[in-house]
Amino acid sequence: MFSSTAVPIHGNYHGYYAKRPSVNDPRLELLPPSTFAGKRVLDVGCNEGWVSCEIAQSHGAVKVVGVDIDDALVRAAWRRRRTVWSAQGPPEDETEIVGSSRKRKRVEPVGEPDYFPASCAHSHGPLPIPPSSPELFPHNVSFRTADWVNDTIPEDEGGYDVVLAFSITKWIHLNGGDAGLKSFFARVAAVLPPGGQFVVEPQAWDTYRKAKRMDKRLRDTAQGLVLRPDDFPRLLSEVGFGEPVRLGSVGEGGFHRPVDLYNKI
Ligand SMILES: C[S@@+](CC[C@H](N)C(=O)[O-])C[C@H]1O[C@@H](n2cnc3c(N)ncnc32)[C@H](O)[C@@H]1O
């Protein structure tokens, strides 16, 4: 099993979200609002789990699985889940009148995010997580350590409705070569039903140069690369996706990247 190294050759950056602020992640805001509602989501390369937690808490997903190759990041993702839970406010008193009895019933017990300041959890420890519906935050989000290009995880068996690949294609490409990238796309196609959606934030080819400098093995692999990010639509059509919709480009400085949405046919 892979464990954290000093050189983040998989893009396994620690403290990533200190450099790339991701509360109300602008990439998620590009997506149609219904993208995650009632859906099962796989977040490949979830890093410290910020995006997975946001989708699980605020975008109505019934199940979010974050997977990352770096076990230390996955442990941080579980901690992030607890931190986000501890900042969430009490359930809003959303009620409806049931029948003629005028009995009141809570319909959606979801609290406001960022209701409690982070200092509360720092001073008093994180809040306990009471039992609740598996489809409600935080029970609807979990994390796994795996190299998802080469290994399966138990959740894959049931499939997903949406797969996210934010800022990971370069790392898969540089570590696994053209063959690794193709098998990644084939695996995404295999876990999505017709109508399923693949959301990709590809890194541009010119950013590969800096990554290659990290490690000799990446440099060697890069020399044999024939495919380029511009080939992704063709590669994805070969495994069953329609033409992508470019939703826009967001992010500051070097993080300014496009987000593309593919529908499985
Ligand atoms: C640059 S970070 C992007 C994090 C996150 N997706 C985002 O955009 O906010 C890339 C992440 O992908 C993970 N990763 C790279 N290759 C992977 C693989 N084969 N399987 C699972 N995770 C992988 C890295 O460990 C790292 O956390």
Image (cartoon, rainbow, N blue to C red):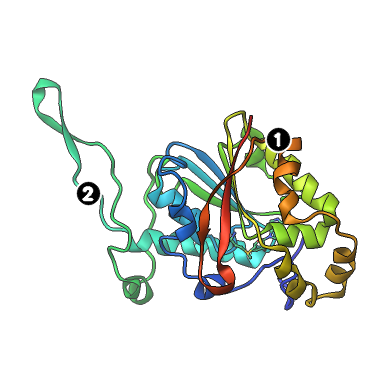
In the structure shown, which secondary structural element does the residue marked by tag 1 occupy?
helix
**Amino acid at the residue labelled 1:** Ala
Question: Can you tell which mark lies on residue 190?
Answer: 1
Whether label 2 lies within 8 Å of ligand 1 gets the answer no
In the structure shown, which secondary structural element does the residue marked by tag 2 occupy?
loop
Residue 151 lies, with reference to residue 254, above or below; the image says: above
Whether label 1 lies within 8 Å of ligand 1 gets the answer no
**Image position, residue 196 (x, y; %):** 58, 34
Q: Which one is nearer the viewer's eye here, 95 or 27?
A: 27
**Image position, residue 153 (x, y; %):** 68, 45
Question: Can you tell which mark lies on residue 104?
Answer: none
Q: Which residue is mark 2?
A: 92
Local crowd size for mark 2, using a 10 Å CA cut-off: few (<14), some (14–19), many (≥20): few
**Image position, residue 194 (x, y; %):** 61, 28
State the residue at coordinates (67%, 68%): 12
When asked about the image quadrant of residue 163, the answer is top right
State the residue at coordinates (40%, 51%): 57
Q: Quadrant of ligand 1?
A: bottom right
**Amino acid at the residue labelled 2:** Glu
Mark 1–mark 2 Cα distance, whole angstroms, equals: 39 Å
Q: Which one is nearer the viewer's eye here, 220 or 132?
A: 220
Residue 95 lies, with reference to residue 4, above or below; the image says: above
- Left or right of 185? Residue 18 is left
What is the number of callouts on the image? 2
Look at the image and tell me in which quarter the C terminus lies: top right
**Which label's residue is closer to the chain start, 1 or 2?**
2
Q: Nearer the observer, disc 1 or disc 2?
A: 1
Local crowd size for mark 1, using a 10 Å CA cut-off: few (<14), some (14–19), many (≥20): some
Q: Which one is nearer the viewer's eye here, 135 or 248?
A: 248
